[in-house]
């Protein structure tokens, strides 16, 4: 009996020891696993120049403005609609806009919730793409592209008395509008211009004749030796609700005065235009799309013609690249997006970093 009790006690001690060892090993492995995850996260973050401004929703195409001393960002709101990826961009099936704000660069970001929903736009069909905003005469304006019920992109406008919305849309799209990516620039004399357009899924090439051709090219002019399709620019009416005058081409020439060609995918316009003014020069900036650069061209007039200047941002992670540029407290910043959070091209996150104008007027290249 005594031997049996001794054996049982010994076994019990052994079992406890093994259990303790297993528990210790398990905890150690769990801590090592957690440390590995943190190390991986830290390594991943170090691969990027900046970090996402928000992570609770997916955001893209950030149009930034300073209104009443506060920074407001008007982005697309990415969702996973379960649509397979294709060259028409059907997988970018956004349905509302959230407006973000911050008191300063690096400060807390506030999400003001849904400012405009596609269901509240009477003429809309699908796909609320990259918006922009403007302010004039006590009213804030939100400009947005969306496909109408015939699946043709038009540009609409909505108004609010607050920069954070909510916004009330006009009952019809802007007359004479088409394609995507509206960007509004107001010059020193108070005149406002809209720049818009995008090829491929943005349908700009299907308007080459002046009328929409549903059976037209799915990409560009399909002739590599002709001048590339141009972004469009038009003066806005005083009430900011309509076009005031003809839609013109934003012509981009090389240093020899020759227009960029369709074959010049590293330099020609694709989508995502923006305008800012610095030292009395107008900087037209845009995405080259399928080669994923941000490029710039300059002019002495807001309507051009413009002279190509070069790339100022290398490709981000993800297929698309879309930006805005704004001066804040004497410094210039670029707001842009990539796919750091999701790794998926249609689920993006907005970011910001400083932009440098060099003494010779060029823009310093950014490696995102």
Image (spheres, rainbow, N blue to C red):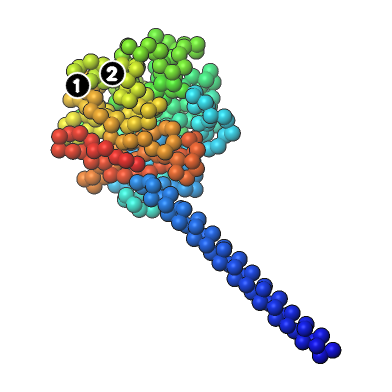
Q: Is residue 99 above or below residue 193?
A: below
Check disc 2 and report its element: helix, strand or loop: loop
Residue sitting at x 32%, y 20%: 264
- In this rendering, position of residue 205 left or right of residue 314: right
Number of other residues with Cα within 10 Å of mark 1, as a class: few under 14, some 14 to 19, many 20 or more: few
Q: Residue tagged by mark 1?
A: 255
Asked whether the viewer can see residue 62, the reply is no
Please report the residue visible at 37 percent of the width from the left and 11 percent of the height from the top.
Answer: 223
Q: Nearer the viewer, residue 241 or 229?
A: 229
Q: Is residue 362 visible?
A: yes
The residue indicated by pointer 2 is 260
User: Residue placed at 53% from the left, 18% from the top?
Assistant: 150
Disc sitting over residue 187 in the figure: none
Residue sitting at the far front: 3
Foreground residue among 239 and 175? 175
**Residue 4 in the image, given as x and y percentages of width and height:** 82, 85
Q: Is residue 335 above or below residue 285?
A: below
């Amino acid at each position: 009996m005594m031997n049996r009790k001794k054996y049982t006690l010994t076994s019990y001690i052994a079992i406890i020891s093994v259990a303790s060892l297993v528990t210790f090993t398990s905890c150690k492995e769990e801590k090592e696993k957690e440390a590995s995850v943190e190390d991986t996260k830290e390594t991943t973050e170090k691969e990027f120049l900046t970090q996402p401004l928000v992570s609770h929703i997916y955001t893209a195409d950030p149009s930034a403005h300073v209104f009443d001393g506060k920074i407001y960002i008007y982005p697309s709101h990415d969702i996973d609609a379960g649509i397979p990826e294709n060259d028409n961009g059907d997988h970018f099936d956004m349905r509302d806009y959230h407006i973000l704000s911050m008191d300063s660069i690096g400060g807390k970001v506030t999400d003001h919730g849904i400012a405009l929903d596609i269901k509240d736009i009477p003429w809309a069909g699908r796909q609320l793409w990259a918006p922009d905003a403007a302010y004039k005469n006590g009213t804030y304006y939100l400009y947005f592209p969306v496909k109408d019920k015939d699946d043709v992109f038009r540009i609409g406008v909505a108004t609010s008395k607050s920069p954070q919305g909510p916004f009330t849309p006009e009952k019809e799209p802007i007359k004479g509008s088409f394609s995507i990516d509206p960007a509004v620039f107001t010059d020193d004399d108070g005149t406002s211009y809209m720049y818009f357009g995008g090829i491929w899924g943005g349908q700009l090439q299907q308007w080459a004749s002046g009328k929409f051709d549903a059976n037209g090219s799915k990409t560009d002019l399909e002739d590599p030796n002709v001048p590339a399709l141009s972004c469009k620019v038009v003066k806005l009416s005083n009430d900011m609700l309509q076009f005031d005058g003809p839609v013109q081409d934003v012509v981009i020439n090389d240093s020899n005065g020759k227009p960029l060609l369709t074959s010049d995918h590293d330099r020609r316009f694709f989508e995502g235009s923006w305008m800012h003014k610095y030292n009395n020069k107008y900087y037209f900036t845009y995405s080259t799309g399928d080669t994923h650069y941000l490029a710039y061209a300059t002019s002495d007039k807001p309507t051009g013609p413009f002279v190509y200047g070069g790339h100022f941002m290398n490709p981000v992670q993800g297929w698309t690249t879309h930006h805005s540029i704004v001066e804040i407290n004497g410094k210039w910043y670029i707001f842009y997006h990539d796919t750091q959070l999701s790794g998926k091209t249609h689920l993006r996150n907005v970011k910001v970093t400083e932009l440098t104008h060099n003494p010779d007027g060029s823009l310093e290249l950014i490696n995102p």
